[in-house]
Image (tube, grey):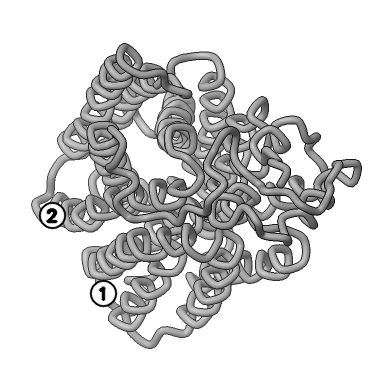
Amino acid sequence: MTRFDIEAFIDRTRIGSTQGVALLVCILICFIDGFDIFMIGKIAPAIAQDFGTTAKAMTPVFVYQQIGLAVGAFTMSPLADRFGRRFMLIFSCLVFGTITLVSAHAASLQQLAIMRGVAGVFMAAGLPMAMALISELTPIRRRSMLVAVALAGFSTGSAASGIVAAWLLDAYGWQSGFWIGGGVPLLCVPLLVLFVPESLKFRAERNPSDVGIARTVRRLDPAATLNGDELFVLGTGDTKGRKAKLTDIFSEGRLAMTTLIWAACTLSMTNTALLSAWLPSFFQEMAGIPIQQFAVTAMIGYLGGVGGTLVIGWMMDRMRPALLLSGFYVVLAACLNMLAWVPFHSAGFLPLVIAWSFFQTGGQAGLNTLITQVYPPRMRSTALGWAGGAGRIGGVVAPIAGGFALAQHFSLQLTLALAAALPLGVALLMFLLAAVRADRRDGTAQPVTA
């Protein structure tokens, strides 16, 4: 039988309409991930007021949401390495969108918290699955950049959530955020069903004799030469199917690398969860800034995250990724600390918010992109999802810590100084990762430089 190298085929294929629609869907999924995570924090005081309680009472909503996201990251992501990225994305978007729309009619904060937790289970792996899918459909020469473009949807979603707090809140209530949060993933379902194929690399690793792969190959390149007796492989890979195992991300010398990446994601996503949940409340309670005013500034500032995501995607194709990320997180820590000291109404505050968002969102996007580079396709969704799951565990603690800071009447300066320790920890871990990868290169050839 004829060996057909899927890796080489994807790398020489021009980016066409199929990859374009897949990229659009991935952008929308990343959009809703960013929108959903930041939206609740920006409108938390309004939700609490509507239910006749204080902002601190929103803590269970944040905690349940993070628990759901952690559970989903550990359970749904491996399923994408078993049943396919496309199938699991369709299922996840359908369930998450439906539950989110229903959440707009919650009768109590307890009901809302439970529904946020359940919805989180189904959307937690949305971004990892989208990253795996787009990275496996695009040529290597454009891969990091297209992954960055998709991840820019996360920053766009973050900025869009500010629209709810700034302009829709007074006219349509906090429910408007849930209408957007539920409608966008439901829009992704028909796009996935009709226009987006399953990852060829995933299918080839599972079953090199899959006759359906030939149809997708011709869809991506009608001029492709096929004889009908192909075995579809990745590079010089095995012609026997190889199913993913949960232990793959720790095997073949990956233990140290995976441990460092998990720790970095935990600290990074803990920082993101803390600030997405409580930053508007911190400024309102500790500095007297109304959430509507802060929302407008944050909405503009989060556009810096789009720039950070695109810039780091471009830079990661040209520099050692782990060292680059280490630098990003050092600057992020400095920006976060300075937010408490620069007056809100001064000319320097908005540029500082843009810079903070640039390095925070760009740094997390860089971590996700790094994972798509250093793990092979058969375990890529699991690697992305479980790294995110480790981060979500830290996210469970973050809302509690934010509520504690408010209850203890911490100053804004003390609160943000403590938060800045998290990105400094990520910077150290990325520096160690660069050293670990350098040691591995001394002994064995590595396809990717960290």
Q: Secondary structure at mark 2?
A: helix
Residue closest to the eye, 444 or 321: 444
- Residue 248 location in percent, x, y? 34, 47
Return the residue nearer the eye: 445 or 45: 445
Instruction: Give the residue displayed 40% in from the left and 59% down from the top.
Output: 78
Q: Amino acid at mark 2?
A: Phe
The one of 74 and 10 positioned closer to us in this rendering: 10
Residue 278 visible within the image: no
Q: Is residue 153 left or right of residue 320?
A: right
- In the rendered image, residue 224, in percent from the top left (x then y), is placed at 85, 42
Amino acid type of the residue that numbered disc 1 sits on in the rendered structure: Thr
- Residue 318 drawn above or below residue 158: above
With 241 as the anchor, is 200 left or right in this view?
right
Quarter of the rendering occupied by the C terminus: top left
- The image quarter in which residue 121 lies: bottom left
Looking at this view, is 16 or 179 the one in front?
16
Residue identified by numbered label 1: 53
Farthest-out residue, left: 408
- Relative to 105, is 13 above or below? above
Residue carrying label 2: 404
Structural crowding at the residue carrying mark 2, measured as other residues with C-alpha within 10 Å and reported as few (<14), some (14–19) or many (≥20):
some
Image position, residue 288 (x, y; %): 30, 47
In the picture, residue 234 is in which quadrant? top right
Is 394 displayed left or right of 13 in the figure?
left
User: Residue at horizontal 43%, vertical 48%?
Assistant: 379
Residue 151 can be seen in this image:
yes
Spot occupied by residue 84 in the image (x, y as percentages of width and height): 55, 61
Closer to the eye: label 2 or 1: 2
Q: Earlier in the sequence, mark 2 or mark 1?
A: 1
Mark 1 closeness class: few <14, some 14–19, many ≥20 residues within 10 Å: some
